[in-house]
Amino acid sequence: MSENKFDLINLVELQLLEKNIIRKASEISLLKKNEKLQKMEAEFEEISANHESISRDYADIEHEKKKLQDSISLNNEKIKKHEAKLFSGTITSSKELVNFQEEIKQLKLNNDGLESKEIELMIKVDEVKPKFKQAEAARQTIAKEIESLKVEISLKIKEIDEKLAVLKERRKSVIPKIPKEVCARYDEVKAKKGGVGIAVLKNRVCDVCRMEISSGEASKLQDPDVIHKCPECKRMLIISNESIENLKAEIDAI
């Protein structure tokens, strides 16, 4: 395959950069869809629903207890007023006296019933309160863990984003070094071959399809300054050299 003279290592560099750009973008995508975070958020929703349910039960009991306490207080006020009236000496009718005594008795009976219900509610409060505190603690704990994981993920994404920017900028700078017709051919092969257009031949082995090329075929692929074609995978093939190996290590380290 003949092309205008240019350094073939630039073509290898382009593919290595694109490969690493895709890999970094994939890493960011996986981080954004972090399975651990998704599980924790689902658990948080479950714990929050349980916490909300217990909170409602707790609030309902407290509300009912408050109503009972208000009723008891109101009855006690009435009892005090009736007793004050009873012992004031202003009641002259025996019927009125009996009526006050009967009403005081009824108010006290009502309070006895209300106080029994209040005790029942207090027992319920004692049962629900630890569950409420436990649910609240669990909710706060997982909320902190989620926030911590989000910060960790955010920092990792930022780090990868910075590396991604370096790779993209370097890709921009290498493209003008490659003849347009070669870039077009590279894009064509890349589109047909799963995004990989360039293969490097080292020790008669294609580094993409991993097939060993026969001695006869290898003898035809000797010129390091020419873009060959892999007889197996049909990708554009370049003969390996020390510069290419160093370049691979350099870009992989970004």
Image (spheres, grey):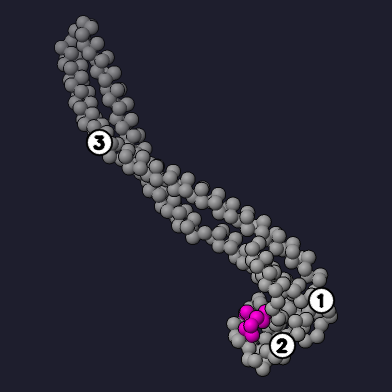
> Which residue is disc 3 drawn over?
123
In the depicted structure, whether residue 178 falls above or below residue 213? above
- Tell me the number on the disc at residue 251: none
**Where does the C terminus fall, quadrant-wise?**
bottom right
**Residue 40 screen position, x and y as percent:** 45, 54
Q: What is the magenta range? A: 197-208
Q: Amino acid at mark 1?
A: Phe
In the depicted structure, whether residue 128 falls above or below residue 251? above
CB within 8 Å, label 3 to label 2:
no
Gap in Å between the C-alphas at discs 3 and 1? Answer: 87 Å
Q: Identify the element where label 1 is drawn.
A: loop
**Residue 181 screen position, x and y as percent:** 81, 79
Q: Is residue 82 left or right of residue 167?
A: left
In the depicted structure, whether residue 151 falls above or below residue 194? above
Gap in Å between the C-alphas at discs 3 and 2? Answer: 89 Å
**Residue 24 screen position, x and y as percent:** 62, 63
Q: Is residue 189 left or right of residue 131?
A: right
Residue 247 shows up from this direction: yes
Mark 3 or 1 closer to N-term? 1
> Outermost residue toward the top?
89
Residue 251 counted in the magenta span: no
Gap in Å between the C-alphas at discs 1 and 2? Answer: 18 Å
Q: Is residue 154 left or right of residue 4?
A: left
Q: Quadrant of residue 130?
A: top left
Residue 200 counted in the magenta span: yes
Q: Amino acid at mark 2?
A: Leu
> Which residue is disc 2 drawn over?
221
Disc tally is 3
> Which residue is disc 1 drawn over?
6
**Residue 55 screen position, x and y as percent:** 38, 41
Q: Identify the element where label 2 is drawn.
A: loop
- Mark 3 or mark 1, whichever is nearer to me: 1
